[in-house]
Image (cartoon, coloured by chain):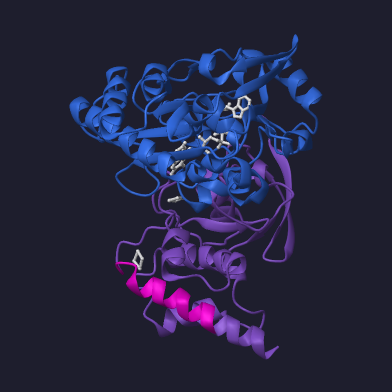
Amino acid sequence: MIPGSFDYHRPSSIGDAIGLMSSLGDDAMIVAGGHSLIPMMKLRMALPEHLVDLQDVQSLKSISIENSQITLGAMVTQAELITSEELHEICPLLREAALQIADPQVRYVGTIGGNVANGDPANDMPAIMQTLNASFTLVGPNGERSVAARDFYQGAYYTTREDGEILSSIHLDAPTSGHGSAYEKQKRKIGDYATAAAAVVLTLSGGTCATASIGLTNLSETPLWAEEAASILVGSSLDRETIKAAAAAAKAITNPAEDGRGPIEFRKHVAGIMVERAIAKAHSRAR
Amino acid sequence: MSDIDVKMTINGQEIEAKADPRTLLIHFLREDQNLTGAHIGCDTSHCGACTVDIDGKSVKSCTVFVGQANGSDITTIEGIAHPDGTLHAIQEAFRQNHGLQCGFCTPGMITRAYRLLQENPTPTETEIRYGISGNLCRCTGYQNIVKSIMAASRELSLKEAAE
Ligand SMILES: Cc1cc2nc3c(=O)[nH]c(=O)nc-3n(C[C@H](O)[C@H](O)[C@H](O)COP(=O)(O)OP(=O)(O)OC[C@H]3O[C@@H](n4cnc5c(N)ncnc54)[C@H](O)[C@@H]3O)c2cc1C
Ligand code: FES
Ligand code: FES
């Protein structure tokens, strides 16, 4: 399959990239790792006239951690997220989720920025970012703004990012030390997108759940932050009954499509199980 | 749409060429550079038959535009054997352990194993299975591929120890 024709650009600074994106207009697209975009271009579902490759923009490539504040440059690859020990130390959910994305080859080149900017509800990182309450920095001709991951997604492949804006970095506070987290993803085989997946971060205080956050992947047009389900956990001892009630509340907000991964009822059913397992695992990891 | 000039090192040799930006790296390697070792199995980024090593990473070359690879250092299956033509330990291990049947996936498997063993010289069986999870084989059932990579790992470690 040969993609449509385009002109290729490789700016070396974020300023040049923004300039190119605004002068080339609607027909230009960013290419990061290309592992979502190029398959779409082969299918002619994406037909950019210009590709602006960010690989030479060094300022987008670093992981920085100050106290418990984490900044991930948009061009950090999934493989780099996985190998960062410092990051794993304070926020193990990121490695756990990244390891469940695709396969080694895809993870060497697929970027965190591309994964969250893409807007495909099947991408895993958006729900992780909602669970962790991350925010995205967008830069464009009119300057810089920050959008919460929980407000970024509006529909399948439809986000609040304007044409011409570049997602430059992701910011989050590491969950408090002693927290427990887990990402449970049901897939048909390695490299597949989720039938259903759930992320959980929680903290304990004297045996009861003090805080909780739950995110869901590929169960609607957008990632889902299951606020009500998480609130059911808070104040409980995370007993069987409470976990069941939270899973039911999470299931209630899902709206999966029927596809090769199964009929709607099945995918909702799996969603409930993923939520239960993720809560139990996060609980077992919390101190 | 204008052609671009590309320059890269492929199997130790510097090359320069003009290319249409929409050329996929796998097509550039096979059709322009006559390096037909890397195969096109699926053309949908799933099978790993097109795997090449770019700047120390295993990459599916059916999912890279030639311009993205401009300036990089590429190793394909043609560059894995020693300059004198003797097989690399991984190739020899595939031969000794019946690590291939039709051979279609083999260039991708070996190129991937090459990078895996540099990152993790003594992988467990499970680590090998996860490490090659981006490479599909329709023939072997993977058993002998895993065995071959294990054998190559032992061979390379012995060599290392001897040096
Ligand atoms: C076989 C296979 C299996 C996969 N399995 C999974 C999986 O299980 N889970 C999963 O989450 N993903 C999966 N993926 C997708 C993969 O993780 C992609 O790499 C990722 O979704 C996109 O990252 P990228 O860097 O490749 O982005 P690209 O493909 O380059 O870009 C994706 C989109 O985002 C836009 N974009 C990229 N970067 C920016 C930026 N900085 N600012 C603004 N816009 C930007 C592009 O214009 C494009 O529209 C799979 C891919 C393959 C090929
Ligand atoms: S041909 Fe590239 S992954 Fe199959
Ligand atoms: S040996 Fe035939 S596909 Fe692997």
Question: Chain A colour?
Answer: blue
Examine the rendered structure and indicate whether residue A84 appears above or below residue A256. Answer: below
Q: Position of residue A221 (x, y in %)?
A: 38, 19
Examine the rendered structure and indicate whether residue B57 appears above or below residue A121. Answer: below
The residue lying furthest to the bottom in this view is B162
Examine the rendered structure and indicate whether residue A261 appears above or below residue A234. Answer: below
Q: Quadrant location of residue A236?
A: top left
Q: Quadrant location of residue A227?
A: top left
Which of the image's four quarters has the C terminus of chain B? bottom right
Chain in purple (letter): B
Q: Which residues are magenta?
A: B140-154
Residue at figure coordinates x 67%, y 41% from the top left: B67
Does the magenta run of residues contain B153?
yes
B119, A234: nearer the viewer: A234
Which of the image's four quarters has the N terminus of chain B? top right
Does the magenta run of residues contain A19?
no
B111, A277: nearer the viewer: A277
Examine the rendered structure and indicate whether residue B26 appears above or below residue A123. Answer: below
Q: Position of residue A249 (x, y in %)?
A: 30, 20
Q: Is residue B129 left or right of residue A94?
A: left
Residue at figure coordinates x 61%, y 64% from the top left: B119
Evaluate whether residue B29 shows in this view: yes
Q: Is residue A245 left or right of residue B161?
A: left
Q: Position of residue A95 (x, y in %)?
A: 54, 45
Magenta: main secondary structure: helix
Q: Position of residue B49 (x, y in %)?
A: 45, 58
The residue lying furthest to the top in this view is A142
Count of marks placed on residues: 0
Q: Is residue A10 left or right of residue A50?
A: right
